[in-house]
Image (cartoon, rainbow, N blue to C red):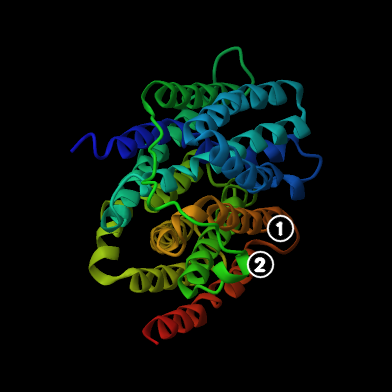
Amino acid sequence: MAGRYRTLIVLGIAQCFGQTAAPMMVLLGGIVGAKLAPDLSWATLPLAVMVLGTACTTVPATMLMARYGRKAGFLVASGYSSTAGLVAALAIYAGNFPLFCVAAFLVGSNTAFMQQFRFAVAESVPADQIAKCLSLLMLAGIFAAFVGPAIASGFSQVAGLPQYVGSFLGMSLMISCSFLVLLIFYKNVPLDEREVFGDPRPYARILREPNLLLAMGAAVVAWSVMSLVMTATPVSMHEMDHHSLEDTAWVIQSHILAMYVPSLFSGFLVSWFGVYRIITVGTVLMMGVVFVAYGDPQLMHYWGAMVLLGIGWNFLFVGGTTLLTTSYRAVERFKVQALNDFLVFGLQAVGSLGSGVLLALYGWNSILWLCLPWLIMLPPLLWLTTRAVRQ
C-alpha cells in the first residue's frame, strides 16, 4: 500500500517544508514592503511579484520536466529557491526594496514547480483515487499554515539582527529541507506507454472540451479572488486599521488553515456528490466573502471573510484540478498543464498587482467590488458545462 502511494507520501512531506515560504511572504511581504517601499501604494508589490514569479515560471517548469523528468525540475527549483530567504534578509539589511522583490520572485518561482506536485500525484494513482489523493496532498498546507507564520512572527525579533531578518533565514532553511526530501526519496513515475500515444491535439480542439473550460475557470476564479483579497488583508489590517502583528498573523494563519483543512474531506465529497456540486458550493462560499468583509470590517469580520475565502478556494481548486486531469489525453498533459497554470497564475498576478494600488487609492471595499466580476463568471459556465455534458 505504501509503495502504491509513495509519490503522494514523498511529495506531501516535501510540500510541508517548501510550502511554508508562501504564507511567510504573504504575512510579511506587505508589512516589510511598507517599510522599504518609497510609497505605501507599492507595499504589496512584493506579493504581486511573488505571483508574477509563479506565472512566469509555469511554462518553463513544464517544459523542463517534459524533457528531463519531474525530479530534475523539482530539484532545480528548490535548489535555487532556497536562496530566497537569504536574499530577503540581505534586502532588509540594505533597505533595498527591489532586492526584496527579487526574493519574492524566487518564492513564486518555486511555487510554480510545487504546483506540479498535484499532477505528479495524479499520474501515480488510479483515476478513481485522484480526487482523494489530491486532497491528501493538500493537507501539507496545514503544516505550512502553522509553521510558516510561526517562524515569521516567532523569529521576527532576533537579537543582533534587524526586524524580520530571522524570519527569512528560517524560510531558506525550510526550502532546503524540501530539497533534501526530494533529492533522497523522490522517484519519477513512468506512465504506461499504452496511454501515451499519438500527437497532442492543437489548443483550438482541446479548448472545445466543456469540462476543461470549467476546470480552468474554477481555478482562475479560486486563485484570482483569493490572491486579490489575501494580498490586501495584512496591509489593511496592520498598516491601515492598526491591528497587531499577532492578530494579523492569526487571521492569515486561519485563512491558510481554511484553505487546507477541508482537504480532510473535500476529495471524498467530490467522489460522493460530484465535481459540479463541489464547484458550485465553492462559488457560493467565495461570494460570502464579499458580504462578510464589506463596509468597515472589524477583527472578526476579517477573520470570517478569510476563513470563507480559504474554504471556497479549496472546493474550487480540488474540484477544478480533479476535472482538469480528466479533460485531456496523457500525451497532452504537459501542454494542457502549462496552459492552465499560466492562465491561473498570470491572472492572479494581475490581481495582486492591482490589489495594493486599489487599497491605497480607494480603500478596502474596492478590493471586494473587484471580486464580483470574477465570481459572477462561474454560474453561467457551470450551467453551460453541465448542459453540454448531459447532451
**Observer-nearest residue: 278 or 297?**
278
Q: Is residue 308 above or below residue 18?
A: below
Position of residue 293 relative to residue 83, above or below, is below
Indicate the amino acid at tag 1: Gly
- Residue at 26% over, 71% down: 273
Residue 383 drawn above or below residue 163: below
Q: Secondary structure beneath disc 1?
A: helix
Q: In the rendered image, which quarter contains the N terminus?
A: top left
| Front in this rendered view, residue 134 or 288 | 134
Locate the C terminus by quadrant: bottom left
**Residue drawn at the location 62% of the way across and 71% of the way down:** 369
Residue closer to the observer: 65 or 276? 65
Using the rendered view, name the quadrant where residue 86 is placed.
top right
In the image: residue 386, left or right of residue 24: left
Looking at the image, residue 51 lies above or below residue 321: above
Task: For marks 1 and 2, give the CA distance.
Answer: 11 Å
State which tag comes first along the sequence, 1 or 2.
1
Q: Residue at x 35, y 68 (%)?
A: 275
**Left or right: 197, with 353 as reference point:** left
Residue depicted at x 56% and y 24%: 79
Query: Would residue 150 be visible to someone looking at this image?
Result: yes
> In the rendered image, which residue does mark 1 sit on?
354
Mark 2, residue position:
366
Q: Residue furthest left?
A: 1
Mark 1 or 2: in front is: 1
Label 1 environment density (alpha carbons within 10 Å; few <14, some 14–19, many ≥20) = many
| x and y percentages locating residue 8 in the rendered image | 32, 40
Percent x, y of residue 390: 37, 85
**Labels 1 and 2 touching (C-beta < 8 A):** no
